[in-house]
Amino acid sequence: MRMKEFQDTSLIRQVTSSIHQAAEKLNGKPVKFMEVCGSHTMAIGHWGIRKLIPETIKLISGPGCPVCVTPSSVIDELIRLKGVTIATFGDLLRVPGSLGNLEEARARGARVETIYSPLEALKLAEKEETILVGIGFETTIPGIAHTILEAQRRKLKYFSVFCLAKLIPPALEALLRDDQAAINGFILPGHVSVIIGLKAYTFLSERFRIGGVVTGFEPLDILLGILRLLEQLPNPEIINEYSRVVKPQGNEEAQKMIKKVFGVSPALWRGLGWLPDSGLVIRGEYEEYDAQKRYNLRVRETEPHPECLCGEMLRGRIKATDCPLFAKTCTPVHPVGPCMVSSEGSCAAHYKYER
Amino acid sequence: MCLAIPGKLLKINEKEMGIVDLGGVKKEISLAFLPAAKEGDWIIIHTGFGLEIISEKDALETIELLQQAYSK
C-alpha cells in the first residue's frame, strides 16, 4: 500500500487553491500555526509547503523533537557512568553535553551501543550491565514500557532504564499559557496521536479556544491540515485528518501498558523548564529497572550557550533565521544548540531545505 | 524521532512477535499492542513495535471525499 494518492498533484493544486481562498477571507490578517512534531517539520521542508501557501500563514515549529527538549545534563550523567553499556537511539549520539557527546565518549572507550528497538537493549543486558536511554514521547513510550515488563519476565538483573519520557499535551498547555507564542492552531503529531487518540487534545478547543488537526506526513495530509485549521478558526475543534492510521480512542493496549509501568511526574524540558505532569517515572513495582535510582542519576537545568536561541525556538517565538548563530557558528556539522543537533530539529530542517 | 513507517505483516510468530516486509527488507517486530493484527495487514511500525493497523478503506475514503468535493 503506497498511498500515492496523498502525493497526487491535481488534488494538491486544488487544496492549495482552497487554502488561498480561505486565507483571502481573513483580509490579510496573519495567522500562526504550530506543527508540534519534528517529523512534520521535516515533511514541511521536504515538500516545500511554505512556498505553496500564502505568506500570511506562518508555520512555526514546536517542542516536538524529543532530542531537542532533553536537557544536556543528561548527556553528562551518562558519560559520567563507568563500566555500564549505554544503549541509545542514534538520535542522541551527537547531542553536546559539557563533557562532549556520546559519540566522542565511545571513541574514548565508553561502551555506547546504538539501538533501533528498545528490545535490543535486553540482548545486551544478558551479558553486561546495560542502561537504556529512555527518551521519547507517547509514540516511543509503550515500547519502553513493554521492554521493562519483558526484562522482568526474563528475570534480567543487569538492565535498567534512564526514563526521560515526555508527554505532549501538557507541553501544548504550557505553550498556550505563554502569551508571546500567539498560536492560532496546531498541526498535531500523527504518531503520538496513534497512541493517545483525540480526546487528549480536547482541552485545546474547550479551554483555550484553539483548534488542532491530527494529520499525516504526505504533502496532501499537511495541506489538508492547514486548510482545516483555516476553516475552523471561528469554531475551533479537534479534527482527525489521519483516520487511516489514527483511531479516535488511540491504541488502548499501548495506553494500558504505559499506565501499568509508569506514573505521571513533572519533567524538565529544554527551553520550557519544569512542566507539571509532563513526564513519566517508573512505578515502585519496577524500581529495580529504574536507572535514576540505581545509579543516582540527576536531571538538572544547564546553562545554554549565551547566544543560542533554541529555547525561544522551542516555544515557537522565533524562526531559525532570527538566531544570530544560525548557519554561522551553528551548523549541522558543528551544532551549538539542540534544534540543530537533531536531524528533526527545526534549525536542522531549515538548514537542509529552506536556506 | 516519532517517525513510523508502514510495513506488511507477513507472518505472526509465537509470543506476540511477527515478521514484516519493509519495502523488501524483512524485519521482526513486536505485536504486543496489536492483538487483532492478522497476516496480510499493513501496519505502522516504530522502534520495532507495531503501533496500529492501517486502514486502506479509510485512506481511500479520504481521497474519494476530496475528489467529490472538488468535482462539484
Image (cartoon, helix red, strand yellow):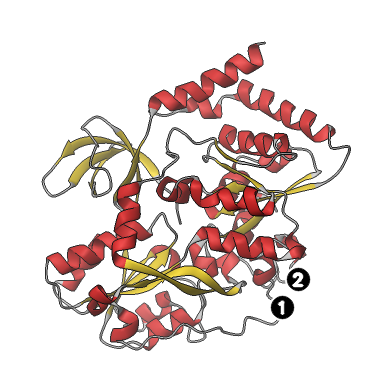
Within 10 angstroms of label 2, few (less than 14), some, or many (20 or more) residues?
few
Q: Residue A204: x, y in percent? A: 62, 52
Please name the residue shown 53% across and 72% down the image.
Answer: A276
Q: Residue B32: x, y in percent? A: 23, 49
Please name the residue shown 72% across and 59% down the image.
Answer: A319
Q: Which residue is mark 2?
A: A324
Whether residue A116 is visible: no
Q: CA distance from mark 2 to mark 1?
A: 7 Å
Picture layout, residue A162 above or below residue B68: below
Residues beneath discs 2 and 1 located on the same chain: yes
Picture layout, residue A253 above or below residue A223: below
Q: Mark 2 or 1 closer to N-term? A: 1
Whether residue B26 is visible: yes
User: What is the three-letter code of the residue carrying label 1?
Assistant: Glu
Instruction: Determine which of the numbered discs, if any, sits on residue A307 in the image.
Output: 1
Res. A219 image quadrant? top right
Residue closest to the eye, A329 or A118: A118
Does residue A287 appear left or right of residue B64 in this picture?
A: left
Does residue A69 appear left or right of residue A180 in this picture?
A: left
Picture layout, residue A144 above or below residue A81: above
Q: Which secondary structure, mark 2?
A: loop
Please name the residue shown 47% across and 71% down the image.
Answer: A94
Q: Residue A231: x, y in percent? A: 71, 34
